[in-house]
Image (tube, rainbow, N blue to C red):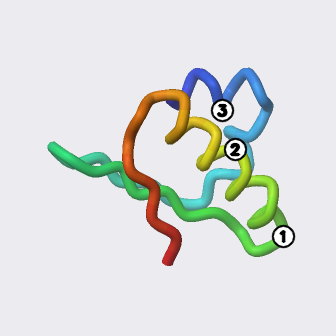
Amino acid sequence: MFEAMEEAETNNRLKEYSLGKEVIYAAFAWSVAEDAYKMMRELAKKHSVGFFLM
């Protein structure tokens, strides 16, 4: 997943992340929230995983 973000040149926008056994948490700055939402949703669909927006 992070490779796709690097290809899309978003790696410098990632504010915070955590990896768990069954979860990936990623937080982004408000200034890129809309773009981050679109990309994360696309990646979730592509990999058939759940997506939750807090």
Q: Find the distance from the CA under tag 3 to the CA under tag 1.
A: 17 Å
Q: Report how many numbered discs are placed on residues in the image.
A: 3
Q: Nearer the viewer, residue 29 or 42?
A: 42
Label 2 close to label 1 by CB (< 8 Å): no
Label 2 close to label 3 by CB (< 8 Å): yes
- Left or right? Give the position of 42 relative to 31: left
Image coordinates of residue 33 in percent, x first then y, are 75, 66
Residue depicted at x 57% and y 36%: 43
Q: Amino acid at mark 3?
A: Met
Q: Amino acid at mark 1?
A: Ser
Instruction: Give the number of the mark in front: 2 or 3.
Output: 2
First along the sequence among labels 2 and 3:
3
Residue depicted at x 49% and y 57%: 26
Residue 33 sits above or below residue 3 on the image: below
How packed is label 2: few (under 14 Cα within 10 Å), some, or many (20 or more)? some
- The residue carrying mark 3 is 5
- The residue carrying mark 1 is 31
Q: Find the distance from the CA under tag 2 to the CA under tag 1.
A: 14 Å
Q: Nearer the viewer, residue 16 or 8?
A: 8
How packed is label 1: few (under 14 Cα within 10 Å), some, or many (20 or more)? few
Residue depicted at x 79% and y 32%: 9
How packed is label 3: few (under 14 Cα within 10 Å), some, or many (20 or more)? some
- The residue carrying mark 2 is 39
Image coordinates of residue 52 in percent, x first then y, are 45, 65
Q: Find the distance from the CA under tag 2 to the CA under tag 3.
A: 8 Å
First along the sequence among labels 3 and 1:
3
- Quarter of the image holding residue 8? top right
